[in-house]
Image: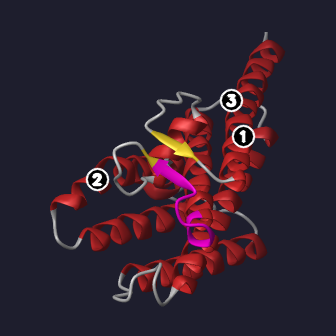
Amino acid sequence: MPSVDTVQNPHPFHRRHKNAILLATLLSLILISPLGQLFKDSKLLDMILVTVVMAASLNAVSYRKRSTLLIAIGLAILAVISGWTQAFDNAGPHENHPLYLILSHSFGAVLYIYIAALLFKVILAEDEITVDQIFAGVVIYIFIGLAWAHFYGLGEVFHSGSITSNNGSDPNFIYFSFVTLTTLGYGDMLPITPMAKALVIVEAITGVMFVAILVSTLVGRVNRRR
């Protein structure tokens, strides 16, 4: 006979709060990563945080069917390997080995979009509103921003200066992506090339449409329960 604790908590903590854990790691990546600029090995801190996020992402979809999970694991492994390789490429991504940067951005973007799609599918399939769904919605929104940051990074590889900063510093693609996603448009960073401008348009539309679809879905469930 199972114990009382087993009946009350059939799943371990990391499974019951998978989306909350994932959200916490994403916020850590956004908030802690800038501190790495104070240290010599800032790339090391960035890749540690990214690796933790990817591990939490796999935990969030670990309940899915085997084939889906295997795809996610494969993408995560490729993203981690290419990311670590690019981070410690002494020659520099824009000099001798742009392939490392291309692979890092490509696998990172695909993984974030794939995990976001899986989480969104679960939200649409559920009949009740739960705290876990709210966390999942926030996670998807952040994943959209991170995926587009990788897209902007790819654009920079193929056309240096595709996004410029008014103060002359190197562009921060994560910052630019979320400013675009939320349609804030501070104007301190600007898209220059036609491809960069196209990505900005698509990201802005994606952000607005996602929020509209998510809110309408949740409101519809509330109305159905009345």
Residue on which the image places disc 2: 34
> Crowding at label 3, few (<14), some or many (≥20) Cα neighbours within 10 Å?
some
Asked whether the viewer can see residue 133, the reply is: yes
- Tell me residue 217's x, y (percent): 78, 27
Task: Determine which of the numbered discs, if any, sits on residue 57 in the image.
Answer: none
- Tell me residue 119's x, y (percent): 68, 50
Residue on which the image places disc 1: 201
- Tell me what residue is drawn at x 16 percent, y 59 percent: 38
Q: Nearer the viewer, residue 68 or 200?
A: 200
Which SS class for mark 1?
A: helix
Tell me whether the residue at label 1 lies in contact with that at label 3, contact meaning CB atoms closer than 8 angstroms: no
Q: Nearer the viewer, residue 189 or 123?
A: 189
**For discs 2 and 1, the disc positioned in front in the rendered view:** 1
Which SS class for mark 2?
A: helix
Residue on which the image places disc 3: 211
Q: Taking 72 as reference, is 149 above or below it?
A: above
Disc 2 from disc 3: Cα separation? 27 Å
Which residues are the magenta region? 156-164
> Crowding at label 1, few (<14), some or many (≥20) Cα neighbours within 10 Å?
few
Asked whether the viewer can see residue 7, the reply is: no
- Tell me what residue is drawn at x 76 percent, y 68 percent: 65
Q: As shown in the figure, which amino acid type bears the numbered disc 1?
A: Ile
- Tell me what residue is drawn at x 34 percent, y 53 percent: 169
Disc 2 from disc 1: Cα separation? 26 Å
Q: As shown in the figure, which amino acid type bears the numbered disc 2?
A: Pro
> Crowding at label 2, few (<14), some or many (≥20) Cα neighbours within 10 Å?
few
Q: Determine the image quadrant of residue 42.
A: bottom left
